[in-house]
Amino acid sequence: MSGRDMDDQVRALFDELGTDPPAAFRAGLRAELALAWDAGAPGEPLAPVVALAARDGSRRARPWPAVAAAAVVVALGAVALAARDRGSPDTVTAGPGTTMTAPEATTTSTAVPAPVEGIWPTAAADRSTDPDATARAFVATYLGLARPVSTAAAVGGLSATVEVAFLGDDGRPFAPMTTLSLARSHPGGTWTVEGASSPGIDPGYGLDHGAVLASPARIDGRANAFEGTVQIEIREDGMVAGQALGRGFATGSGDSDGSLGPFAADVAFDRPGRPFGAVLIFEDSAAGDGRLIQLAAVRVAFAAP
């Protein structure tokens, strides 16, 4: 709305009321209407009159708030209609003697995305916004390793990788490193371990993320491990260290030069109570103390019975 249009609007309003307000009041009302226009909404109908009365202490201005209320209502109605014409979502109609009712404001709430579903954690109490803390808790709770681990996290948006080194009796890390893959559903969200990989264990193509397993499950791939042997566990969501639907092992042919040799085993497992779980393929310590040296973990689904 241009300045001339605003002047014409104010003049027409008071002509319609058959009265001639003081010039100061007319100018003040025009300024208040301009502010309402710039704000894109009419606001409280009597706000301009109250503002003028508060600013103008003269005797001549004091009687005008009560007399000019109808003019202000009409003027603000015109501002609202103009705002609607320029794209405002409000629809307001007004005229002399018409009471304007502003539409109720609607609030659109944005739901926080649910955490990413993965291998661990599945309980809300175990979730953390710190990827390093998530990795350490995964090693302690899901893998059951009480000894400290050496970790190094690299975060990139909604994904992260954490390099984990399992420590030996001498405090030095075993080689090679195991990489945990983490994800979160939104910035600032909690992290979920989606899988684990190690250069010494390469699961077969049949164990792609989301593979569907039925018992007995064919677990194969390539590995370089002590005497070529890898341990295998099949777990459902919610299980932790010491729990499994099924266990097995496979003996391959890893060479001392670090090259990977093939392995394969058919692992039977109990009927799962949940639709998703994980396959763990790992090399443990030759000392038989249960410590891990390297690990691969893949998220899987279970076939319907």
Image: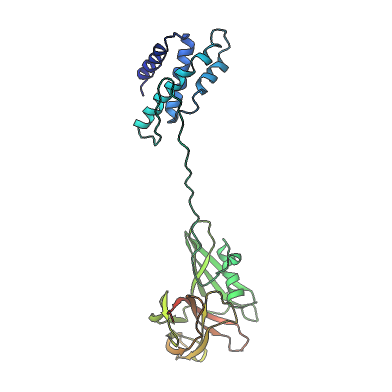
Residue ID at (56%, 85%): 284
Name the residue nearer the viewer: 298 or 74: 74
Q: In which quarter of the image is residue 86?
A: top left
Whether 48 is drawn above or below 294: the answer is above
Q: Is residue 108 above or below residue 176?
A: above
Q: Which of 119 and 271 is in front in this view?
A: 271
Position of the C terminus by quadrant = bottom left
What percent of the width, then of the height, locates residue 145? 62, 78
Image coordinates of residue 44 in percent, x first then y, are 50, 27
The location of residue 85, given as percent across then percent down, is: 34, 31
Front-most of residues 251 and 42? 42
Residue 197 can be seen, yes or no: no
> Can you tell which quarter of the image residue 222 is in?
bottom left
Give the x, y percent position of residue 19: 44, 9
Q: From this viewpoint, is residue 8 visible? A: yes
Tell me where residue 36 sits by quadrant.
top left
Q: For this rendering, which residue is in front, 95 or 213?
A: 95
Name the image colouring.
rainbow
- Name the image quarter holding the N terminus: top left
Q: How many labels does the image show?
A: 0
Image point 53% across, 15% down: which residue? Answer: 66
Outermost residue on the front side: it is: 97
